[in-house]
Amino acid sequence: MATSPAHTVNEYIAGFPVPVQKRLKQMRRAVRRAAPRAAETISYRIPAYRLDGRVIYFAAFKTHIGMYPVSASIQKALKELAEYASPGAVATVRFPHDRPIPQALVGRIVRLMIEERRTRTRAKLRARSRPK
């Protein structure tokens, strides 16, 4: 696993064994396909994607790739996420290393996160513009 903090997503990925690098690249591709205009950065020492605010983070661990935050409403909307639920962790899904990365599902998560973010932003703007 990575020993020193990465400054780019490429550096982050390069810090892992080749099999994990392949899985991280699959995650990255799925996120980039779903959000091609999202800014890619490192935040909290892991890959992060922003588009009108935070969209998604992912990180490699010994047994899985974690993805967060995945809101409760998205977890309810995407029933297939139940098999990737993280026991005891809120807003997290885990993709085990012994199973393929569900790239289409990752893409749906990202698109829903973007829409959720935009909906919250619009609601905040409407609340600010209301007369008191």
Image: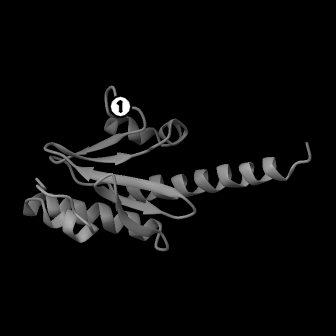
Q: Residue furthest right?
A: 131
Percent of width and height locating residue 6: 22, 63
- Nearest the viewer among 100 and 72 is 72
Percent of width and height locating residue 7: 26, 67
**Is residue 99 left or right of 125 when viewed as pictured?**
left
In the picture shown, does residue 129 fall above or below 63?
Answer: below
Element at label 1: loop
Q: Residue at x 33, y 51 (%)?
A: 44
Could you tell me the amino acid type at mark 1? Ala
- Nearest the viewer among 83 and 49 is 49
Q: Is residue 83 visible?
A: yes
Judge the density around disc 1: few (<14), some (14-19), many (≥20) Cα neighbours within 10 Å: few
Q: Residue furthest bottom?
A: 37
Q: Residue at x 59, y 50 (%)?
A: 116
Q: Residue at x 20, y 48 (%)?
A: 99
- Colouring rule applied to residues: one colour
Q: Badge 1 is on which residue?
A: 89
- Nearest the viewer among 85 and 118 is 118
Percent of width and height locating residue 53: 54, 58
Q: Is residue 105 visible?
A: no
Q: Residue at x 43, y 45 (%)?
A: 69
